[in-house]
Image: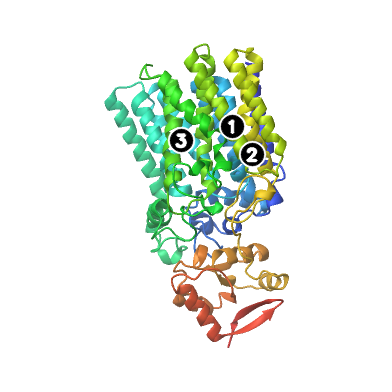
Amino acid sequence: MRRERLAPAVLLAGTAVLYLWNLTASGYGNEFYAAATQAAAQSWKALLFGSLDPGGTITVDKPPAFLWVSGLFAKAFGFSSWTVLAPQALEGVAAVGLLYATVKRTSGPAAALFAGTAFALTPVAALMFRFNLPDALLVLLMVAAAYCTVRALENASPLWLVLAGSAIGFAFLTKMLQAFLVLPALALAYLVAAPASFPRRLLHLLGAGLAVVVSAGWFIALVELWPADSRPYIGGSTNDSLWELAIGYNGLGRIFGGAGGGPGGGGTGGNIGFGGETGIGRLFGASMGPEISWLLPAALIGLGAGLWFLRHAPRTDRTRAALVVWGGWLLVSGAVFSFMSGITHPYYTVALAPAIAAVTGIAGTELWRGRAHLPVRAALTAMVASTGVWGFILLDRTPAWTPWLRWVLLAVSAAAVFALVFGASRTWLAGALVAAALLGTSGYAAATAATTHSGSIPLSGPRSQQGGGPGPREGGSSTEVVQLLKATGTRWAAATVGAQSAAALQLASGRPVIAIGGWNGSDPAPSLDEFKVLVAEGQVRYFVPGGGGGGRGGDNEIASWVAAHFEVTTVGSQTLYDLGTAG
């Protein structure tokens, strides 16, 4: 009993060290979202809607739930690099703890400890739980939904199932439709395995579905009912609608590309920052493979073997139900990530990490218990061999980084396979299996945690392999410009085209900056007429040219109007317009 209590404590402590150690070395991480956290710390309305600036011009291109956490953190402890990044790290520790608790309820402490450790040491998890993107809270809420579903399966509890639906609803308010990818697995597991009559199971699922709608829909209703002229424009939407953002840019546009796909790259090119070629091999490719696939072959083998060997188990068998939960999560999400042709980044795969870790832990433990039978031992051997071989291939893709590690991994895996085939002692063999499974991924995760990350497309792995796309443009944030903005007393110190430039200026000066056009300068906010009113009322002091974007007219119109009507001045190496003086 004491060992069972000590093991999760050590797991959580180790995870906290991995995710929190030297966290602020990455500065503000993603400055786009850091600026929104800064705004949230200064304005309750900016916090509520996820505005990019305290004045509430335009929101980020995601729903604001993850900014509620970091914004409240910054309000409580002051805005800093640590308050921007620490919430994600703490969410990671909580997610690991919840995964441990979930797997333990169906498969025991050994499987739970392996699953929690494998999850914590997945490279993309070590990346995303140290970086300020929505995915950290998304994963925590999805794991919470799985935990509640497993609790509901124990005695057909409608309350626990409603809590699972509520968690998914709030996950929708974190990253919209991606949260729904786990719903088929959770619903199928309950429909198949809950110890209740079929009509009751259906009724419980309907209640959980209503919980999803209510927990996600209240904020959509709030945004739609709130007067549009007294709240920020919904960034990323075409008509100032959160619902349209969910269906378009952050929904079908992500899956099918084309209109509504927004800025960035599709999935058919080889750009490492955009996921690589679409298809069944994408999760193993150059972009996504090093992030997530270290245990993926083992998980797929274990899932197939586990479901086959349990095919004659009672309907309510808890182990098979757990494999349906985590395996369904893995298959549905993995298929979507593999074939979606809109904007796709490698770090999205963090949503697969809990499922891969859980399936590997559950299936591996069950196969270990039945290893006396030749077919079971063969499946377990295949899991170990595939992990060693695939880990060697992944490490060989970065040959300049710790070249000895891949050979050690291969040797340990070979020893474990040999021991399984010829029946070595239990203690030695168990240790070899765990080492073979975790050696490659743990080394890569440690390298990830030791590397600073910034920009909009972070990648895991050692520093020499970083290529994570462009970060926010500096927007002319020289020392002279920053000092000039700090000295302003207007509602907004400046305006510039594109949120990337605006974020850098706002973070450097601590003063609100209007991000004309939102993320890439293409959103129709503010309009030229709205901007003219703000200038006439003396609410904006400077316009800083040179920002990003070139989209639907409003940004070009504003820049052209400013250039035609105001004096240009040079501060340091940066030109800007003083909106308080006519040209």
Alpha carbon separation for disc pair 3 and 2: 23 Å
| Marks 3 and 2 close (CB-CB < 8 Å) | no
Q: In the displayed structure, does residue 370 sit left or right of residue 411?
A: left
**Residue 389, numbered label:** 1
Q: Which residue is rendered at x = 51% and y = 32% of the image?
A: 297
Q: Amino acid at mark 1?
A: Val
Q: Amino acid at mark 3?
A: Leu
Q: Earlier in the sequence, mark 1 or mark 2?
A: 1
Q: Which residue is rendered at x = 64% and y = 39% of the image?
A: 395
Q: Is residue 24 visible?
A: yes
- As helix, strand or loop, the secondary structure at mark 1 comes to helix
**Residue 133, numbered label:** none
| Marks 1 and 3 close (CB-CB < 8 Å) | no
Q: Residues within 10 Å of mark 1 (few under 14, many from 20)?
A: some
Q: Is residue 154 visible?
A: no
Discs 1/3, front: 1
Percent of width and height locating residue 257:
41, 55
Percent of width and height locating residue 178:
44, 45
Q: Amino acid at mark 2?
A: Leu
Looking at this view, is 115 or 9 the one in front?
115
Q: Quadrant of residue 566?
A: bottom right
Q: Residues within 10 Å of mark 3 (few under 14, many from 20)?
A: many
Say if 152 sits above or below 473 in the image.
Answer: above
Q: Earlier in the sequence, mark 1 or mark 3?
A: 3
Q: Earlier in the sequence, mark 3 or mark 2?
A: 3
Label 3 sits on residue: 330
**Residue 395, numbered label:** 2
